[in-house]
Image (tube, rainbow, N blue to C red):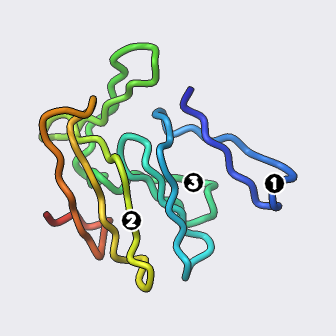
C-alpha cells in the first residue's frame, strides 16, 4: 500500500521503494537530473536518482519518530512539536527549482491549511 516505483531505463525495468506512506506526488528538478522530491506524508528528497531518500519537511532535526495509526498506511510523522502536518501538494518555481511551494494541512483534510515557500527546504520552511 505504500510502495512507489522508479525506473532508470525508460520503463523497461522498475524498482520499488517505500517511504512508509503512500506517495502523492513527485517533483523533478530540471537542472539536476539526480534530484527528486516526493510527498509521502512529509516531503522527501533524493539526490541520487531515487536510491536513497531523506525527509526534508518537517525538518529532519525535529523528527522524533513515525506512528502507524492502523494497518491502512496511515503513518504520522512525529516531531518534537507534536504530529507534523501532512504535505498535500508541492510546486517548484519553473526557472528555479530551489524555490519550492508546499501546501500542508491537518491529516484527514479538515480544519486548517497553510502554504509555505522556501528557497532552502533543508534549513526550514518559512511561512
Q: Residue at x 34, y 46 (%)?
A: 88
Residue reaching furthest to the right:
12
Q: Nearer the viewer, residue 38 or 24?
A: 24
Q: Which residue is mark 2?
A: 91
Identify the mark at residue 11; answer none if there is no mark: 1
Q: Quadrant of the C terminus?
A: bottom left
- Secondary structure beneath dot 2 equals strand
Left/right of residue 50 with respect to residue 75 in the rendered view: right
**Residue 44, horizontal then vertical, whole percent:** 43, 53
Please report contact status of discs 2 and 1: CB closer than 8 Å, yes or no. no
Identify the mark at residue 52; answer none if there is no mark: 3
**Residue 114, horizontal then vertical, whole percent:** 17, 53
Dot placed on the residue nearer the N-terminal end, 1 or 3: 1
Q: Residue at x 33, y 76 (%)?
A: 99
**Residue 46, horizontal then vertical, whole percent:** 53, 60
Q: Residue at x 13, y 41 (%)?
A: 112
Dot placed on the residue nearer the N-terminal end, 2 or 1: 1
- Secondary structure beneath dot 3 equals loop
User: Foreground mark, 2 or 3?
Assistant: 2
Q: Is residue 75 above or below residue 29?
A: above
Left/right of residue 36 with respect to residue 120 in the rendered view: right
- Secondary structure beneath dot 1 equals loop
Left/right of residue 51 with respect to residue 10 in the rendered view: left
Dot placed on the residue nearer the N-terminal end, 2 or 3: 3
Q: Nearer the viewer, residue 66 or 25?
A: 25
**Residue 12, horizontal then vertical, whole percent:** 87, 52
How far apart marks 2 and 3 lie (CA) works out to: 22 Å
Q: Quadrant of the N terminus?
A: top right
Q: How many marks?
A: 3
Please report contact status of discs 1 and 3: CB closer than 8 Å, yes or no. no
Amino acid at each position: 500500500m505504500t510502495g512507489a516505483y522508479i525506473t532508470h531505463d525508460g520503463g523497461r525495468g522498475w524498482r520499488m521503494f517505500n517511504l512508509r506512506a503512500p506517495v502523492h506526488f513527485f517533483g523533478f528538478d530540471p537542472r539536476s537530473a539526480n534530484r527528486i522530491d516526493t510527498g509521502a506524508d512529509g516531503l522527501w528528497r533524493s539526490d541520487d536518482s531515487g536510491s536513497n531518500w531523506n525527509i526534508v519537511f518537517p525538518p529532519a532535526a525535529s523528527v522524533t519518530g513515525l506512528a502507524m495509526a492502523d494497518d491502512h498506511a496511515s503513518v504520522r510523522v512525529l516531531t518534537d512539536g507534536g504530529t507534523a502536518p501532512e504535505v498535500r501538494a508541492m510546486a517548484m518555481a519553473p526557472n528555479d527549482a530551489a524555490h519550492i511551494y508546499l501546501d500542508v494541512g491537518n491529516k484527514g483534510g479538515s480544519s486548517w491549511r497553510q502554504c509555505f515557500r522556501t528557497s532552502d527546504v533543508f534549513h526550514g520552511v518559512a511561512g
